Amino acid sequence: MGHRPGGPGCTGGPLVKSVTGPAEEVVVVGAGLSGLAAALYLTGAGCSVTLVERADDVGGRVGRYRFADYEIDSGATVLTLPALIDDALAAVGADASNTTPPLRIRPLDPAYHARFADGSELRVFADADRMSAEVARACGPDAAVRYRRLRDWLGRVFRAEYDEFLAANFDSPLDMVRYRDKRAALIELIRLGAFGRLGTRVTRTLRDPRLTRLFTFQALYAGTAPEQALGVYGAIPYMDTALGVYFPDGGMRSVAETLAGAFTDAGGRLELGTEVTGLDYRRNRARRVLLADGRALPCDAVVLTADLGSLDRFGARPRRGLRASPSAVVAHGTVPAEIAQSWPVQAHHTIDFGEAWDRTFAEITPWRGGRLMSDPSLLLTRPALSDPGLYLTRGETRYEPFSLLAPCPNLDSAPLDWDRLGSAYLRELLAVLEERGYHGVAAQFTVDRLDTPATWLDQGMLAGTPFSAAHLFRQTGPFRTRNLVRGRENVVLAGCGTTPGVGVPTALLSGKLAAQRVVGENRGVRTRAPATVRRPSGTEAVN
């Protein structure tokens, strides 16, 4: 590995290690958000980039499921920090307003609607005044003062860590003290108490258990319980509750499609339905990317976005002893709109909390002996309430897309037979919703797709979880699996398993950080003539 100046987005000026040798021909494996971002930054830096994806669509964990008369987002439904999308597009001189079609992203207001076992409800607004009023209404004026205090602390934690920890490459944990800006950020985080426990800090500040849940459930994104999560993960609830949650017209899948279109318009080559079987090495350099159809793509460097559970076949062994995050059961389908309109909550995102809380985390997050939730807390997603264009009509009945997510243990902690258990567990969850007032959901929810830990495992995901490695202290920040592959001179990782971690904004940052490892300082934008998209049928479509 060599050293080049910090690339796009770097601050503080440290020299970061990068691949050695030429970096003119780069192959990016996987067209999820991290792969798309990496491809855009590399193309903008003057590289000739080929992006290969085994699925028929782009998006990865932010993709789509197609059914007879509708489509639905297959993965993440929460979008924060949309400016990172603008940054990736700007790398090739594009912006959301001039893509075809234009990408329109709107704030969700409220971001979430929380419902509790005692019948009370809370909406989450990004605006501090509106949220204070909501907290005062539901929990009293003293709670509103406490909310302001917590919001201020979460914001200071976020600002202290973003540039130097979330949006930066690390060559070593010693970077935290070796470079002035990182050292200053570390000192500020220590001063803020950000290496204490998040759950303890939030509970002590807010006191009301309903508010505590609303500002700590995001620890699940990091793969740990609130009482175990470090305060630095306060950045996640800050993004969710203060910086705003957004939704693009047409669904989350529109983000990936827009990034892909900008990439091909800038001269990049995208191959869909193309399975990569391995990398051909000469000594420690990848020389060719091997495809299932018998072809081989020559390369100067490779950006690999495969899940940590699939790295072996690419000659990039994952770190030993990784602990995986909890997993999830997710059901996708449709419900009659008239029935859904009678439900107790009308919101894009509803978090329906069970009465238990600490017990829920104790059940799904232990590394051995995990269990299904005995008192489920569930995420309900109804995107047509924000984008009416997603409604569909069958005969004289109008339907809306509907997704139900239930956290569950991963296969390492609970090796359950999900092929046998999945449908029965879904019936139990729907019965719980019926009891909570979501009448008609058990009988009228037409399920077109059920994802379980077995589904994720079949896709090569670590321990059957789409949330990859848990953000334990030894698996986070400079201690997370590095994006430079040990013993490989020109292979770089991107995606939620490597730095900076799990989530939509972090996936976009991961692609940017991977591009830095390949080219170092951004060498400027170079636009080529539009390229073709090679589809599995062999037909060619001009983007």
Image (tube, rainbow, N blue to C red):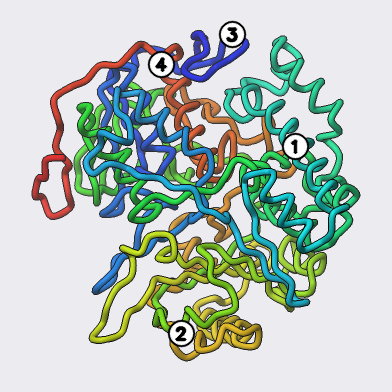
The residue beneath circle 1 is 232
Q: Residue at x 81, y 69 (%)?
A: 359
Of callouts 4 and 3, the N-terminal one: 3
Helix, strand or loop for disc 4: helix
The residue beneath circle 3 is 13
Q: Does the image show residue 372?
A: no
Location of the C terminus (image quadrant) = top left
**Label 2, label 1: how far apart the Cα atoms are:** 42 Å
Q: Nearer the viewer, residue 421 or 167?
A: 167
Residue 183 position within the rendered picture, expressed as x and y whole percent measured from the top left = 75, 16
The answer to whether residue 490 is above or below residue 262 is above
User: Which amino acid type corresponds to the residue marked 1 in the rendered image?
Assistant: Val
Q: Residue at x 73, y 41 (%)?
A: 234
Which one is closest to the eye, mark 2 or mark 1? 2
Q: Residue at x 29, y 28 (%)?
A: 94
**Label 4, label 3: how far apart the Cα atoms are:** 15 Å
User: Which amino acid type corresponds to the residue marked 3 in the rendered image?
Assistant: Gly
User: Which amino acid type corresponds to the residue marked 4 in the rendered image?
Assistant: Val
User: Which amino acid type corresponds to the residue marked 2 in the rendered image?
Assistant: Ile
Helix, strand or loop for disc 1: helix
The answer to whether residue 204 is above or below residue 356 is above
**Contact between labelled residues 1 and 2, with CB atoms less than 8 Å apart:** no
Helix, strand or loop for disc 2: helix
Mark 3 closeness class: few <14, some 14–19, many ≥20 residues within 10 Å: few
**Label 4, label 1: how far apart the Cα atoms are:** 30 Å
Residue 499 picture quarter: top right
The residue beneath circle 4 is 519
Residue 267 position within the rendered picture, expressed as x and y whole percent measured from the top left = 20, 27
